[in-house]
């Protein structure tokens, strides 16, 4: 036996009107939410760089100190020998947070009625190796990992909730 529930003909118009209103609301809020998420991600990445792994926003783990060889190389090139870590010219940080910078990848789009997407990343070849490390170099995550990533997600959810409340 199969039971199919169908709205009464007089209810169909009301349901359609409700769905249309929700779609329009999503179309109005979608771009704001995507922009807020990308802005927050940019802020967190910059904060991780400033704190050399420790974000004042979401925590994290301090990056390992630089190897002696790297400190000497930096000094020979005229950069501070120890700090800031991962920052000589600023190009890597810019490639992660500056939308006008070469290597920065950011996409915002509408993928359907009321549905939006945002993508953030970089084409800088140094990112993956530094993010994950290798046998002779410790990882220095520029994107939150572990518990910090969970705190990022929770804080992002809270920020997006505020955007919705402020714009209803």
Image (cartoon, rainbow, N blue to C red):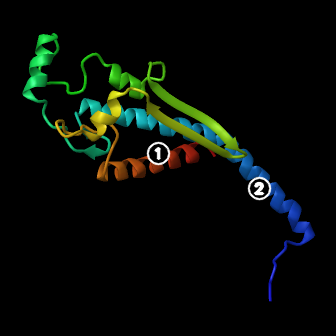
Q: Which residue is drawn at 47% across and 50% down?
A: 157
Side (left or right) of 36 relative to 88:
right
**Residue 168: x percent and y percent?**
63, 46
**Residue 119: x percent and y percent?**
52, 37
Asked where in the image residue 80 lies, by quadrant, the reply is top left
**Residue 21: x percent and y percent?**
76, 50
Q: Mark 2 points at which residue?
A: 19
- Location of the N terminus (image quadrant): bottom right
Instruction: Tell me which numbered mark, 1 or 2, is placed earlier along the sequence.
Output: 2
Side (left or right) of 165 relative to 86:
right
Side (left or right) of 12 relative to 153:
right
Is the residue 132 above or below the residue 161 in the image?
above
Q: Residue at x 15, y 37 (%)?
A: 64
Is the residue 20 above or below the residue 142 in the image?
below
Q: Which of 155 and 6 lies nearest the eye of the viewer?
A: 6
Q: Residue at x 45, y 25 (%)?
A: 104
Q: Mark 1 points at which residue?
A: 159
**Residue 84: x percent and y percent?**
19, 25
Q: Residue 141 carries which label?
A: none
Mark 1 crowdedness (10 Å alpha carbons): few <14, some 14-19, many ≥20: some
Q: Which of 11 and 151 lies nearest the eye of the viewer?
A: 151
Element class at badge 2: helix
Asked where in the image residue 72 lies, by quadrant, the reply is top left
Spatial CA span between label 1 and label 2:
25 Å
Q: Which residue is drawn at 12% across and 33% down?
A: 65
Q: Which of 27 and 81 lies nearest the eye of the viewer?
A: 81
Element class at badge 1: helix
């Amino acid at each position: 036996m199969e039971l199919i529930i169908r709205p009464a003909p007089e209810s169909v118009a009301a349901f359609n009107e409700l769905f249309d209103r929700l779609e329009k609301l999503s179309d109005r809020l979608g771009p704001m939410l995507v922009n807020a998420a990308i802005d927050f991600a940019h802020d967190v990445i910059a904060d991780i760089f400033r704190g050399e792994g420790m974000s004042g926003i979401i925590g994290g783990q301090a990056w390992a100190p630089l190897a002696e060889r790297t400190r000497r190389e930096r000094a020979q090139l005229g950069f501070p020998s120890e700090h800031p870590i991962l920052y000589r010219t600023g190009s890597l940080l810019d490639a992660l947070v500056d939308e006008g910078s070469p290597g920065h990848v950011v996409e915002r789009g509408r993928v359907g009625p009321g549905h939006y997407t945002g993508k953030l990343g970089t084409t800088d070849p140094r990112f993956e190796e530094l993010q994950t490390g290798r046998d002779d170099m410790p990882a220095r995550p520029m994107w939150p990992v572990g518990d910090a990533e969970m705190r990022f997600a929770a804080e992002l959810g809270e920020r997006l909730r505020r955007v919705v409340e402020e714009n209803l």
